[in-house]
Structures are given as structure tokens and as C-alpha cells.
């Protein structure tokens, strides 16, 4: 048997063994000795380790470190790496937490109490109003609620969710000099620093009124008031309505070129380039088709709302009627003409158009609204008899909802002015149906004064 210290390479005999060992050492010299390298190198050494080298040789294979040292080294390395990672990330984590905004405070009050409600900076309030209407006040907003539960937005932004109203009723929200009339919908009201009113509709249909209807909005549409509606010298101040989409027309055959031109016109209008938008719409109108019909209507809106030319707008809409007597937008065009004439102070023209509308559209959902407008126009001319007839048409028309309350009260008022014995009872009937209505005080004064029919008591 060989003694320790003697070198006898006889165990290296065999080409396969030499190649394996040579490859292992070559790889070890070429790489930094890490854990994986050492494990691979030792694994390639021949297995027989119990045989002692002859002539004093040392064993070929040196003793491998105990396995617990490998385990301990791995644990130590992992701990060091984790500590370094925490030390590197800790300052960043602190910075992110410090920069994170304070979450908004959200409170629910149900139902909302009468009075003024305000939210501070970063605060949001969710209220439940009378009738189930939900109001969500954003940061720095102001809203007033009256005794009847009707809301008025005085500043900031408030989102409303109004449940569907029963027949003959509508929910009204006030904003500046405007009334926003809804039948069941979701929409937002916002007042900026210049006191401009923004109405943004998400669901349902919303109408904006002052003395007459200014806009009828569908989902995705936005209406913006003039900058100073209360101080404008022009009785027909320009109104800006910026719909996110135009009226949809059932026209699958629209050419791509027409779609592109219409989109370009809308973009020009949104960018404030009114002249270019008007030119594009006029070109589209000349092409005809569904896109041309929509463009012909939009021309009137631009002339009235953007350029402040009500007479030219009426002329454009009348041209539309001549070109499209049964067009998709015929009813909307007739209503726009009536509204524009009312704002221009052309009572005779507005009454003529309103009476034509009542005759020509007996089943229209707008008939009650237009009959009510006709009644108001007759009443301002002290023609109470015709006013009563117009209000009766409004109350007998389909979809009377938002016209019902004013038509009922003003009909009773006109009967009282005519010294009709039924006037007092009609006034009491109004108060019974709307005990907290918009005209309650006027109705009570009308009954107390008697006005030709003798004093009547509630």
C-alpha cells in the first residue's frame, strides 16, 4: 500500500477519467470559484475515494467542507442581501408615504336638512335629499336645500342621481339663473369662478331652462352657459352648448369621407374656430344625406349660440325644414325656432310657430312643453282666454311631466283674471297637488286677494 505523500497517478489511467478531470480544472481556472462552480468541479471527480494512493501518495480527492458550512454560508448571504435591500428601499418608501395625498373625507347624511351645505378643501359629502335623490358634493362646493327639498348649487361641483319621477312630476335643480329639469337621470352641475354653469349628463335626459328652454341634453352631452348671463345687454345672449356627440342619425351608409368631415367640423367648433366649423358644415349640408341633414341643423345652432345671430339661425332652420320636411331633426328644428323667437322678443312669430307645432305634432313628447310656452306668451299679452286654452292643451298632451305644474297654476291664475268662478277652485286644486310647489306663495296671495271672484280661504 502506498504511503501518504507519495504521488502515483496510476488511478488517472483511462482517457475518460483524464478528460473529465482536465475539463473540471480548466473550468475552475477560467471562473471565479463560487458555490456553483465548486459543486460542479467536485462532482466531476471520480467516485472511488476509499482507495489509498500507493507509495505514500495522498488521496486523490481532498476532503469537501461539511455540508452545514454550505448551509450556514447560504443563510448568511441571504440575510446580508435582505438587509442591503431593506436599507436601499427604506428612504424611498418614506418619501412615497410622505407625498401621498390625504384621502378625501366622505360623509353620508340622509335626508339632507334644510339650509346651506358646504364642503371644505379635500372633503366630499354624499347626501340623500327628499324623494330619494342623491347629491355628491365635491371638494369646496356649496349647495342650498329649501323646505321642499329642492337643491340649488351655489358653487363647486355636485353630481346628482335622480330616481325616475312619476307622471306629471319632474325634479328641478337650480344653478345661477337657470333651472335644470330632470325626469330621472344622472348628471353633474358645476359653477366656475366666472359663475358659468356647466351641465354634464351621464344618463337620461336633462333640460336647461331660464324663461324658455335653452337646451335638451342626452347622455354624453354638455351644456355651458355664457360667462355673464345676468348682465348681458343682448336679450338673446349667445349660449354655448358643447355636445360630446351630435344627434345620432340612423344612416349606416354614411361615407367615410362624410364622417371625417363631420368630425373635423366638430373639432374645429370645440377649438373655437367657428368660421371654419361653419364652412365645413355648409359643405356637408350641400352633399345631402344623413350627414348633410345633421349639418344643416348644426348651422342654425352655430349662428345662434356662437355668433349671436338669431334671425340668421331661424332662416337656416327654416331652410332645413324646406329641404327635409320629414327629417329626423324636424321636431328639434321647430322647437329651436320657437325658442329663438321667444328670446328675440318676437311674440307674434313665436306664437305662430307654437300653434303650428301643436297642430302638426299631436303625438310629440314636446307638445305639452310648446303648449305651455304658448300659454305663457298669451298670458304676457293679457290674452287670458287663449292662454287658458293653451294650458289645457298642455295638460292634455302626452309626456306632460315638467309642464304640468306651471300649466296648472297659470291656468288657474288666468281663470281668476277672467273672473271665472272656477278660478279659486282651480287654484286650490294646484295647492292640493303641489303643497310645496314653486308657485305656492303666488297661489296663496291669489286666493287671499280674491281678484274678482271674492275672497277665498284655504
Image (tube, helix red, strand yellow):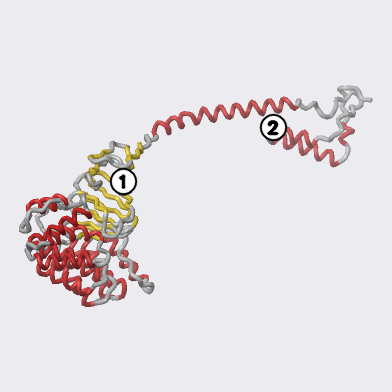
On the rendered structure, is 16 left or right of 438? right
The residue nearer to you, when weighing 397 against 47, is 397
Tell me what residue is drawn at x 23 percent, y 64 percent.
Answer: 276
Tell me what residue is drawn at x 21 percent, y 67 percent.
Answer: 335
Residue under pointer 1: 135
First along the sequence among labels 1 and 2: 2
Please tell me how crowded label 2 is: few (under 14), some (14-19), or many (20+) other residues with Cα within 10 Å.
few
Residue under pointer 2: 35
Alpha carbon separation for disc pair 1 and 2? 67 Å
108 shown above or below 169: above
State the image quarter where residue 238 is shown.
bottom left
199 shown above or below 69: below
Residue 41 spot, x, y in % from top left: 75, 35
Of all residues, the one furthest to the right in this rendering is: 1
108 shown above or below 361: above
On the rendered structure, is 131 left or right of 386? right
State the image quarter where residue 422 is shown.
bottom left
Dot 1 falls on a residue whose secondary structure is: strand
Dot 2 falls on a residue whose secondary structure is: helix
Tell me what residue is drawn at x 25 percent, y 75 percent.
Answer: 286
Tell me what residue is drawn at x 88 percent, y 22 percent.
Answer: 4
The residue nearer to you, when weighing 75 against 309, is 309
Amino acid at each position: 500500500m502506498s504511503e501518504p505523500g507519495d504521488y502515483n497517478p496510476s488511478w488517472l489511467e483511462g482517457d475518460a477519467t483524464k478528460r473529465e478531470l482536465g475539463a473540471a480544472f480548466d473550468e475552475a481556472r477560467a471562473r471565479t470559484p463560487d458555490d456553483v462552480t465548486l459543486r460542479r468541479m467536485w462532482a466531476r471527480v471520480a467516485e472511488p475515494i476509499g482507495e489509498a494512493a500507493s507509495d505514500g501518495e495522498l488521496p486523490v480527492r481532498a476532503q469537501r467542507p461539511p455540508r452545514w458550512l454550505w448551509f450556514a454560508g447560504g443563510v448568511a448571504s441571504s440575510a446580508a442581501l435582505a438587509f442591503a435591500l431593506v436599507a436601499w428601499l427604506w428612504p424611498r418608501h418614506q418619501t412615497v408615504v410622505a407625498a401621498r395625498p390625504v384621502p378625501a373625507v366622505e360623509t353620508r347624511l340622509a335626508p339632507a336638512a334644510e339650509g346651506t351645505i358646504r364642503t371644505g378643501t379635500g372633503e366630499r359629502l354624499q347626501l340623500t335629499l327628499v324623494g330619494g335623490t342623491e347629491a355628491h358634493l365635491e371638494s369646496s362646493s356649496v349647495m342650498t336645500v329649501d323646505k321642499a327639498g329642492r337643491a340649488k348649487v351655489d358653487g363647486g361641483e355636485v353630481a346628482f342621481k335622480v330616481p325616475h319621477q312619476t307622471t306629471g312630476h319632474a325634479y328641478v335643480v337650480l344653478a345661477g339663473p337657470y333651472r335644470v329639469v330632470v325626469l330621472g337621470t344622472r348628471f353633474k352641475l358645476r359653477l366656475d369662478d366666472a359663475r358659468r354653469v356647466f351641465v354634464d349628463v351621464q344618463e337620461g335626459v336633462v333640460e336647461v331652462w331660464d324663461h324658455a328652454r335653452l337646451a335638451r341634453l342626452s347622455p354624453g352631452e354638455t351644456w355651458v352657459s355664457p360667462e355673464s348671463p345676468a348682465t348681458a345687454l343682448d336679450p338673446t345672449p349667445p349660449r354655448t352648448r358643447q355636445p360630446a356627440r351630435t344627434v345620432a342619425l340612423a344612416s349606416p351608409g354614411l361615407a367615410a369621407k362624410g364622417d371625417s368631415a363631420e368630425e373635423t367640423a366638430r373639432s374645429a367648433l370645440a377649438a373655437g374656430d367657428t368660421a371654419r366649423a361653419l364652412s365645413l358644415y355648409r359643405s356637408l349640408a350641400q352633399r345631402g344625406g344623413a350627414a348633410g341633414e345633421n349639418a344643416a341643423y348644426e348651422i342654425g345652432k352655430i349662428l345662434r349660440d356662437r355668433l349671436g345671430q338669431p334671425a340668421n339661425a331661424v332662416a337656416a332652420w327654416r331652410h332645413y325644414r324646406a329641404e327635409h320636411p320629414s327629417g329626423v331633426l324636424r321636431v328639434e328644428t321647430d322647437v329651436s325656432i320657437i325658442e329663438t323667437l321667444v328670446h328675440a322678443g318676437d311674440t307674434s312669430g313665436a306664437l305662430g310657430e307654437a300653434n303650428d307645432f301643436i297642430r302638426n305634432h299631436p303625438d310629440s313628447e314636446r307638445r305639452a312643453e310648446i303648449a305651455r310656452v304658448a300659454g305663457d306668451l298669451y298670458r304676457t299679452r293679457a290674452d287670458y282666454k287663449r292662454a287658458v286654452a293653451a294650458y289645457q292643451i298642455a295638460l292634455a298632451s302626452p309626456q306632460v311631466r315638467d309642464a304640468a305644474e306651471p300649466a296648472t297654476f297659470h291656468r288657474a291664475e288666468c281663470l281668476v283674471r277672467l273672473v271665472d268662478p272656477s278660478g279659486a277652485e282651480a287654484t286650490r286644486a294646484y295647492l292640493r297637488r303641489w303643497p310645496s310647489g314653486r308657485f305656492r306663495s303666488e297661489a296663496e296671495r291669489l286666493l287671499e286677494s280674491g281678484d274678482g271672484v271674492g275672497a277665498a280661504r284655504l
